[in-house]
Amino acid sequence: MAKESTTIDIGETSTVTKSTSHALVDEKKKGFVTAAPGGGYKRGLTIFDFLLRLAAIGITIGASSVMFTAEETLPFFTQFLQFQAGYDDFPTFQFFVIAIAIVASYLVLSLPFSIVTIVRPLAVAPRLILLISDTVVLTLTTAAAAAAASIVYLAHNGNANTNWLPICQQFGDFCQTASTAVVAASISVVFFILLIVISAIVLKRH
């Protein structure tokens, strides 16, 4: 009676295991290579977002400060009357100074969130917070800039229908200073629009 021999081949199993492991590693590498460009693309946008916020901080602080210092006194006056124009003579300019100062403060407070999005460009929560907040602050900035621009326009051109005379012929320096502040605020509006577009692109999944 012949004895049956049993042979166990361990080498082939190990080869299959190694092949499976290599396949899994290759799949992970492929996934990493595919995801990397998206992450890098979004990281670049978040860095640009941070730089825009720094520039907007400087512009809004400058706009609020320039309007706050808008004041001019004419060299001639009477015994009972002195001709002077200042930002605090116009409630709209007062609103402009306060609103743009609030906007500048918000931009400073938003910097940590922007830094978080640079470190984690795929994080949704901080980017969504920035998107909503930027939209609200854009509304405030636009309202302040538009209201101040209307007063500057009347100061330059007046209104014949209501007998409002232009004052910039007499208070030229005051009008120039107020106009500069309005232009700076308008530039910050453009910056906020860019920030909102960047946030929308980053949040887009496809």
Image (spheres, rainbow, N blue to C red):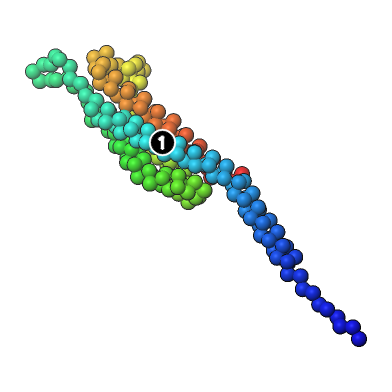
- Residue placed under numbered mark 1 in the picture: 51
Q: Is residue 107 left or right of residue 120?
A: left
User: In this orientation, which residue lies closer to the viewer: 23 or 111?
Assistant: 23
Please name whichever residue, 176 or 170, is drawn nearer the observer in this view of the structure: 176
Farthest-out residue, left: 79
Indicate the quadrant where residue 185 lies: top left
Where's residue 68, x and y in %? 25, 30
Q: Residue at x 57, y 42 (%)?
A: 37
* Percent coordinates x, y for residue 157 in the rendering: 34, 16
> In the image, residue 52 lies at what x, y percent?
41, 35
The vertical placement of 134 against 83, above or below, is below
Whether residue 90 is visible here, answered yes or no, is no
Classify 7 as above or below 158. below
- The front one of 138 and 112 is 112
SS at badge 1? helix
Q: Is residue 50 visible?
A: yes
- Amino acid found under the numbered disc labelled 1: Leu
Task: Name the image quarter holding the N terminus.
Answer: bottom right
